[in-house]
Image (tube, rainbow, N blue to C red):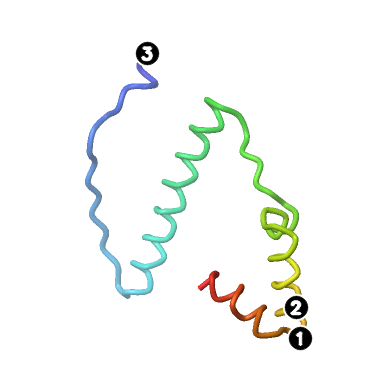
């Protein structure tokens, strides 16, 4: 099938007046490349569903409590020991 064959490496040359223009082109091309990879994956396997809720749902309840206490600014030395594992 022609659509699934890789075409090989391609080289592009850009001429810009300012370094900022080069950065903008680089950002655009990196985004386009990532989107093409994502679209290809979605075409083969379906849409990706990222967790929308709190990421704290993946931690045990005690650890979740410690993180919530740190956010509130009321934490003990026990909490500090638990949170040092995050760093």
Which one is nearer the viewer's eye here, 46 or 24?
46
Alpha carbon of mark 1 to alpha carbon of mark 3: how far?
62 Å
Find residue 64 and name its label: none
Secondary structure beneath label 2: helix
Residue visible at 37% across and 60% down in the picture: 26
For this rendering, which residue is in front, 25 or 66? Answer: 66
Res 30 quadrant in image? bottom left
What is the secondary structure assignment of the residue under circle 1? loop
Q: Name the residue under label 3.
A: 1
Pick out the residue farthest to the top: 1
Q: Nearer the viewer, residue 70 or 81?
A: 81
Please tell me which of labels 3 and 2 falls first in the chain: 3
- Real-space Cα distance between discs 3 and 2? 57 Å
Quadrant of the frame with the N terminus: top left
Callout 2 touching callout 1 (CB < 8 Å): yes
46 lies left or right of 31: right
Which residue corresponds to mark 2?
Answer: 69
- Relative depth, front residue between 2 and 48: 48
Q: Mark 1 points at which residue?
A: 74
Depth check, mark 1 against mark 3: the one in front is 1
């Amino acid at each position: 099938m022609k659509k699934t064959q890789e075409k090989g490496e391609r080289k592009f040359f850009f001429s810009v007046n300012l370094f900022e223009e080069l950065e903008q082109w680089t950002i655009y091309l990196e985004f386009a490349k990532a989107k093409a990879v994502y679209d290809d994956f979605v075409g083969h396997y379906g849409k990706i569903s990222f967790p929308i809720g709190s990421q704290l749902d993946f931690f045990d309840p005690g650890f979740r409590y410690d993180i919530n206490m740190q956010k509130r600014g009321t934490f003990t030395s026990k909490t500090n020991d638990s949170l040092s594992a995050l760093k």
